[in-house]
Every structure is written in C-alpha cells, then in structure tokens.
Image (tube, rainbow, N blue to C red):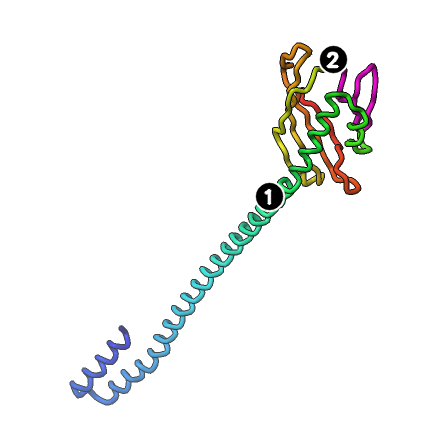
C-alpha cells in the first residue's frame, strides 16, 4: 500500500514537471522504504512459521499421548485374551478333575482324594471324619457318615489366576439326606488347581459357609 503511494507521488511530480531534486528525494525515499517493507513481510512470515511450528508440536504431543494410551489398551486386551484362551484350553481337563474330587470327597474315598491333593494340603482322618488341612493349619471338613448323599453338582465359576498361574473352580454341590430331601443350603466348594511336575493338583480347598 505504502509502496504504491510513493510510486503515484513520483508519477505526479514527473507530470507536474517538478525539479530533479524533488524526484531524486522521492527516489531516495523509495529506496529506503523497500527494505522496510521487506523486513515487515519477513517478520510476518517468521511469526506465521513459528505459530505453525508450535501448533504442530502440540498436535504431535497429543498424538504421542494418544498412541501411548492405545498401546496400553492393546496390551491390556492382549493380556485378557491370553487369560480367556487359557481358560478355554484347560476347562475340560480341570472340570473333569473337579468332578473326581467332588465324587471322592462326598463318599469319603480317602485314596482318591489324596491322589488329587498337592503336598501343600494334608488329609486328616479323625472321629470317622475326613478333613483337609492347609499351610495355615485351617481344617476343612470333607466327609462324615452323616453328610448325606451327593445328588448333583455344577460348576458356577471358572477362572485363571495369572498371579498364581493357577485355576480357581467354584462348585455348587446338591446334597440329599437319608429320606431323599435336599439339604439346605447347598454346599459351595472352591478348588484351586496348579500344574505341579506335569500333573494338575489341588492346592487350595475352601467351602463358602
């Protein structure tokens, strides 16, 4: 805008026949003004480039944070998938062993129960009762003659425990008494299985009471 005005002034001076001195002065002003215009333009360009750089830097930081969040989520999903796959792969085998344990403990088959237990658990016979004792010396009652008879059982829960590399099975046992009536409430048994020397063993026995 300013450059255009100076050129117009120069043209007017020429038309009006002003002296060469005036024209020279105006030319000198033009020559001095051109670097100023260039400097202003360069400053605006630099400011714009800095602004764009800062915007890109912010976008890059946000994208990095989003990428890290997505990577974390993917890792969590992969871990969950691995757990589910382990549960699928071992369900049949662990459920079979669970059935064997339920059948054995409800009729007092000591040898069959013992064969399923790990060395962490101790089987105890006392007063015609069969009990199992863990590391904490807490005893769980497995069998007595007046327990009743197993009518049915179901697995109500099955999950892999990654921190123990073991499986937990939640079982509901339906017991009937001598007259065939259901014993209420049902028995809730929790078994923990762990692979020891290539054999699945019961490492934990608990009853919900």
Q: Quadrant of the C terminus?
A: top right
Q: Where does residue 201 sit, x and y in percent of width and height?
A: 76, 35
- Image coordinates of residue 22 in percent, x first then y, are 24, 85
Q: Which residue is disc 1 drawn over? A: 80
Q: Any magenta on residue 132?
A: yes
Q: Secondary structure at mark 1?
A: helix
Q: Are marks 2 and 1 in contact (CB under 8 Å)?
A: no
Residue for point 64% across, 22% down: 152
As measured in the structure, the alpha-carbon distance from the residue carrying label 2 to the one carrying label 1 is 44 Å
Secondary structure mostly seen in the magenta stretch: strand
Q: Position of residue 55 (x, y in %)?
A: 45, 60
**For marks 2 and 1 on the same chain, the one whose residue lies earlier in the sequence:** 1
Q: Which of these two is toward me, 159 or 178?
A: 178
The spot of residue 190 in percent (x, y) is 68, 28
Viewer-closest of 30 and 59: 59
| Residue at x-position 25% and y-position 78% | 6
State the extent of the magenta-drawn residues as a range.
122-145
Identify the disc placed on residue 146: 2
- Going by the picture, which residue comes out furthest to the left? 16
Q: Quadrant of residue 193?
A: top right
- Looking at the rendered structure, the secondary structure element under dot 2 is helix
- Which mark, residue 193? none
Looking at the image, which residue is at 28% across and 77% down?
A: 3
Q: Residues within 10 Å of mark 1 (few under 14, many from 20)?
A: few
Quadrant for residue 118, please give it. top right
Instruction: Looking at the picture, tell me which residue is in the foreground, 10 or 55.
Output: 55
């Amino acid at each position: 805008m300013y450059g255009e005005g100076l050129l117009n002034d120069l043209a007017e001076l020429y038309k009006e026949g002003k002296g060469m001195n005036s024209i020279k002065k105006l030319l000198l002003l033009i020559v001095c003004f051109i670097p100023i215009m260039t400097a202003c333009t360069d400053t605006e360009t630099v400011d714009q480039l800095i602004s764009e750089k800062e915007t890109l830097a912010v976008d890059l930081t946000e994208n990095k944070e989003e990428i890290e969040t997505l990577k974390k989520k993917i890792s969590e999903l992969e871990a969950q998938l691995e757990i589910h796959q382990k549960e699928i792969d071992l369900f049949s085998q662990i459920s079979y062993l669970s059935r064997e344990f339920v059948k054995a403990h409800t009729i007092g088959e000591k040898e069959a129960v013992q064969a399923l237990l790990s060395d962490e658990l101790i089987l105890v016979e006392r007063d015609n009762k069969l009990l199992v004792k863990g590391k904490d010396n807490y005893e769980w009652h497995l069998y007595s003659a007046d327990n009743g008879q197993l009518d049915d059982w179901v697995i109500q829960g099955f999950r892999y425990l990654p921190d123990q590399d073991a499986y937990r099975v939640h079982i509901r046992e339906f017991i009937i008494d001598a007259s065939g009536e259901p014993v209420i409430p049902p028995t809730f048994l929790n078994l923990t299985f762990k692979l020891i020397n290539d054999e699945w063993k019961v490492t934990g026995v608990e009853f919900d009471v």
